């Protein structure tokens, strides 16, 4: 076989479709985020980041950075082993306690990323619960889809956020079989939010467990930043809450929070937990500092909401179409992969505005978009500049405007 030829043809197909991914080479400015330096060819350019998942700017917070520096000075760089073989550092233990408390659960377990936490937990739950059926929202994230697939459990897809369809699917399953409803709270590409309480009602009615991915909500919603389940006062009704330390908490890593026995079960049986090196202690220390801060401070959440509302209002004033949703995510709909990439390139090269284009397979074809995440650190001038830039490019691309 011509291996190189095969790889090149696959890449060429992505170019043809206008969805070949090019990474922006950035150096984020601690203390001045969302500003960053972009490295391009042999040159540099100052840019403003508008698509970061460091939603609240915690990755640059003094408190988080100090906690990480202190931990490195105390414990060194890496964990030095898997959790079982010398890699459990006291900072991991403290972080797990902090996460259990955040979600009002008896226990929590950390993983090396949110992706791994979903993959590893769903894989072991689905494969070991005897005869388990997993009911998965059709728009669940790739990490959940992969975990379910690797579990080899029977999978039933239900229509996105559709309670009637979920109930019909639950009703059709043998009541004696273990069932797990798997879903997200904030769906990151459309920014819509699941009715967690109603899903828990159905879970109670049909004897199902619930597994909730709060990756795009932890730190962001609820009186102490526990996510949408915290906001809705239903955390204790959800069997497993999964989250990330990499978005609103500004660092890296993932976790589940659940009962003592469920966490102990995953800790003891999950390959994706057992056979990998633990997070660096400094990462655990930084995440703990971010969680502790956001448990007590609403300032970042409130400022972010105000920034999101301001950007939405500015787009409405000039007819830039964006999906309306109740979250912090503003999807500006372009609906064409080539135009989407072109707008993103020109925004970056000519205006210093960085918004990565979102194309298939992350979103369905025809719904290509610019996913904008205003944060508390974007200034009025940043917003004016963004809106003027998009206004220019919308006209140049002859894209439709939305009449209010
Ligand atoms: N779950 C959802 C819904 C996500 O969108 C993502 C990543 O964006 C993840 C899980 C993975 O989280 P992490 O980036 O921490 O691996």
Image: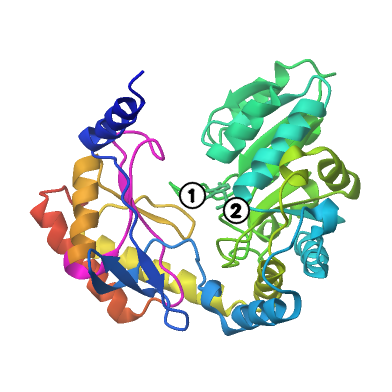
- Residue 188 tag number: 1
Bounds of the magenta span? 350-377
Which residue is labeled 2 in the image? Answer: 215
Mark 2 vs ligand 1: CB under 8 Å? Answer: yes
Q: Residue at x 30, y 76 (%)?
A: 382
Q: Is mark 1 within 8 Å of ligand 1?
A: yes
User: Residue at horizontal 63%, vertical 22%?
Assistant: 156
Give the distance between the C-alpha atoms of the residues marked 1 and 2, in whole angstroms.
9 Å
Crowd rating for badge 2 (residues with CA inside 10 Å; few <14, some 14–19, many 20+): many
Residue 292 seen anywhere in this rendered image of the structure:
yes
How many numbered badges does the structure rendering display?
Answer: 2
Magenta stretch, main secondary structure class: loop
Q: Is residue 223 visible to the viewer in this orientation of the structure?
A: no
Is residue 158 shown left or right of residue 209? left
- How many residues crowd around disc 1 within 10 Å: few (fewer than 14), some, or many (20 or more)? many
Q: Which mark is residue 338?
A: none
């Amino acid at each position: 076989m011509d291996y190189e030829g095969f790889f090149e043809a696959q890449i060429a197909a992505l170019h043809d479709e206008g969805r070949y991914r090019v990474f922006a080479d950035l150096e984020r400015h601690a203390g001045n985020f969302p500003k960053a330096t972009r490295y391009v060819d042999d040159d540099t350019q100052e840019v403003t980041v508008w698509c970061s998942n460091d939603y609240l700017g915690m990755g640059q917070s003094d408190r988080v950075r100090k906690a990480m520096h202190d931990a490195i000075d105390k414990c060194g760089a890496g964990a030095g082993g898997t959790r079982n073989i010398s890699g459990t550092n006291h900072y991991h233990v403290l972080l797990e306690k902090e996460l259990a408390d955040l979600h009002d659960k008896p226990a929590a377990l950390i993983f090396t990323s949110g992706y791994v936490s979903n993959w590893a937990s769903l894989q072991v739950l689905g494969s070991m619960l005897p005869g388990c059926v997993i009911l998965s929202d059709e728009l669940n994230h790739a990490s959940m889809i992969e975990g379910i697939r690797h579990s080899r459990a029977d999978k039933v897809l239900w229509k996105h956020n559709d309670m009637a369809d979920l109930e019909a699917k639950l009703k059709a399953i043998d009541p004696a079989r273990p069932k797990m409803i798997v879903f997200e709270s904030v769906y990151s590409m459309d920014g819509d939010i699941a009715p967690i309480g109603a899903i828990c009602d159905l879970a109670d009615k049909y004897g199902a467990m619930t597994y909730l991915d709060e990756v795009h909500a932890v730190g962001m919603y609820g009186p102490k930043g526990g996510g949408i389940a915290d906001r809705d006062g239903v955390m204790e009704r959800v069997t497993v809450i999964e989250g990330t330390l990499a978005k609103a908490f500004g660092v890296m890593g993932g976790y589940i929070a659940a009962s003592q026995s469920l966490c102990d079960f995953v800790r003891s049986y999950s390959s994706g937990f057992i056979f990998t090196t633990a997070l660096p202690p400094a990462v655990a220390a930084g995440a703990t500092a971010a969680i502790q801060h956001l448990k007590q401070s609403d300032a970042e959440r409130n400022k972010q909401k105000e920034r999101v509302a301001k950007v939405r209002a500015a787009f409405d004033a000039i007819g830039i179409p964006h999906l309306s949703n109740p979250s912090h995510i503003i999807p500006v709909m372009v609906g064409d992969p080539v135009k989407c990439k072109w707008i993103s390139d020109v925004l970056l090269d000519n205006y210093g505005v960085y918004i990565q284009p979102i194309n298939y397979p992350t979103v369905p074809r025809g719904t290509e978009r610019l996913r904008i995440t205003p944060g508390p650190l974007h200034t009025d001038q940043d917003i004016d500049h963004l809106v003027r830039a998009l206004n220019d490019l919308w006209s140049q691309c002859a894209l439709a405007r939305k009449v209010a």
